[in-house]
Amino acid sequence: MLVSDFDFELPEELIAQHPPAVRGSSRMLCVDRATGVFADDHFRNLPQRLREGDLLVLNDSRVLPARLYALRAGLATQVKSPSPTGRIEVLLTQQLGPQEWSALVRPGRKVQVGETLLFPDEAGATVLTAEVLGTGEFGERTLKFAADAAFLEKLDRIGHMPLPPYIHRPNDEPDSQDDKARYQTVYADAPGSAAAPTAGLHFTPEILAGLAARDVEIARITLHVGLGTFQPVRVERLEDIRLHTENYTLPGVTAYAINAALEDGRRIIAAGTTTTRTLEHCAAIGRLEAHSGATNIFIQPGHRFRVISGLLTNFHLPQSTLLMLVAAFLSEQPQQGRERALAAYAHAVRERYRFFSYGDCMLIL
């Protein structure tokens, strides 16, 4: 199959620029996995859509304020603070070691290996420093930050939420106070993501309580969303797609819950493609047990799902690997899965659903 087979027309005004006024008030397109038939609903009704004994698995990764603005050390005496014209934009995408990070930088051509980057606060005082160690396959840089026990605290102080490029904010305001709260799930715990696991943004404490009241079991995994979510597909054929690795943790209590649900024949619903990829990767390598690792699994039409039997997910970009995952889940027959996915998306466009990170969602059961 070709990447272009997963294209669709999306009016720009349907790309959600802000979260809904009330968390949990999103619309939800429900799709029958067996038939491809869909129906319009609202996310607040998720507890009624699930049943006693279902296992819902969430990704509890916490989004870091990973968008930073830096000065090259050689220019630090010339510019008091990182103005829009003189600054280097740095997006931390994955932690590689105790002090090392992979990062996207812009403009990249100016940032050379061996340079030192200075990260100032609004007053111009340097808060963090990093040396550029290397360059990656797609132009990303490896940065080594100076040892600092308060690194995450300082990141919170000077960093900004890494909103996707299709969410537009004024150049001098890369995020807002609302973004800092709403581009984060209510159950986020383990810091490390460069983007939100967006299916989880809909949940509220009340909806989680409603699920528990219906005896829906809830478990958690951690997958830190990294560089892959920002990179477009650069090849024409699906079989040539290679994803970046992302780090994950499968806790023992979650592994036990999954194995018990599989043995009992109960449904396992993944909240998001990140959760899906983690669980399917662990099953593929035969490790549904407590462990941590890294995955670059690409789930495409024809994939045989070993763990999940339900999927909650947002609406994804045209020609994206996440749309391909949705198509794969809708049918084991590749062409049928693609047709069902595009039919559901066409319906969502006609009905004016909101798309992408801050948009509405789809439930496939």
Image (tube, helix red, strand yellow):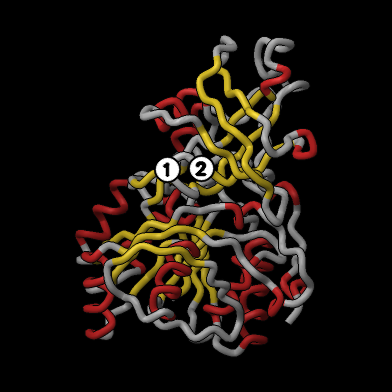
Residue 343 in the image: state x and y as whole percent.
Answer: 66, 74
- Side of 316 relative to 318 (left or right): left
Q: Is residue 52 visible?
A: no
Q: Residues within 10 Å of mark 1 (few under 14, many from 20)?
A: few
Q: Quadrant of residue 118?
A: top right
Give the residue at x 34% y 76%: 287
- Side of 361 relative to 152 (left or right): right
Residue 21 in the image: state x and y as whole percent.
Answer: 49, 37
> Helix or strand or loop: what does disc 1 sit on?
loop
Give the residue at x 62% y 72%: 324
Q: Which residue in the protein does label 2 denote? A: 100
Give the residue at x 78% y 21%: 85
Give the residue at x 78% y 33%: 110
Question: Is the residue under label 1 in contact with that under label 2 (CB below 8 Å)?
Answer: yes
Amino acid type at circle 1 is: Pro
| The C terminus sits in image quarter | bottom left
- Side of 152 relative to 297 (left or right): left
Residue 342 in the image: state x and y as whole percent.
Answer: 67, 73
Residue 338 in the image: state x and y as whole percent.
Answer: 66, 79
- 335 versus 240 height, above or below: below
> Helix or strand or loop: what does disc 2 sit on?
strand
Amino acid type at circle 2 is: Glu
Q: Which residue in the protein does label 1 denote? A: 98
